[in-house]
């Protein structure tokens, strides 16, 4: 399997942290040298490992924001 390269361009913020120290974070990440996208996933404390996540373009992130703002919580 090919190595996945990533560069965290901007750390937006952490949403939660597990007892084992992993944190669910929203970051702006460039995957394999491509245009950066917003990324939501779990990260090990030093970002040496990651869990599954989702990547969103700015348009998709705005659409998600709008959907969340419409929710009755």
Image (cartoon, helix red, strand yellow):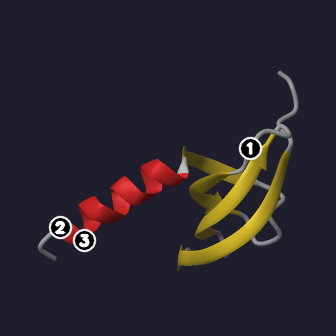
Front residue (pair 28, 20): 28
* The quadrant where residue 1 appears: top right
Does residue 40 lie above or below 22 as drawn? above
Q: Which residue is mark 3?
A: 69
**Residue in view at x 70 percent, y 53 percent:** 50
Circle 3 Cα neighbour tier, 10 Å, few/some/many (<14 / 14–19 / ≥20): few
Q: Which residue is mark 2?
A: 70
**Residue in view at x 76 percent, y 72 percent:** 45
Give the x, y percent position of residue 19.
58, 78
Q: Which residue is mark 1?
A: 35
Residue closest to the far left: 72
Between discs 1 and 2, the one toward the N terminus: 1
Give the x, y percent position of residue 29.
73, 54
* The quadrant where residue 44 appears: bottom right
For the residues labelled 1 and 2, say whether their Cβ atoms are less than 8 Å apart.
no
Circle 2 Cα neighbour tier, 10 Å, few/some/many (<14 / 14–19 / ≥20): few
- The CA distance from mark 3 to mark 1 is 27 Å
Look at the image and tell me whether residue 51 can be seen.
yes
- Say whether residue 3 is left or right of residue 61: right
Between discs 3 and 1, the one toward the N terminus: 1
For the residues labelled 3 and 2, say whether their Cβ atoms are less than 8 Å apart.
yes
């Amino acid at each position: 399997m090919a190595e996945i390269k990533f560069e965290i361009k901007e750390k937006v913020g952490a949403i939660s942290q597990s007892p084992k120290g992993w944190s669910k974070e929203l970051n702006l990440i460039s995957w394999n040298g491509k245009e950066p996208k917003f990324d939501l996933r779990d990260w090990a404390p030093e970002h040496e490992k990651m869990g599954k996540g989702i990547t969103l373009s700015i348009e998709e992130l705005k659409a998600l924001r709008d959907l969340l703002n419409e929710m009755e919580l």
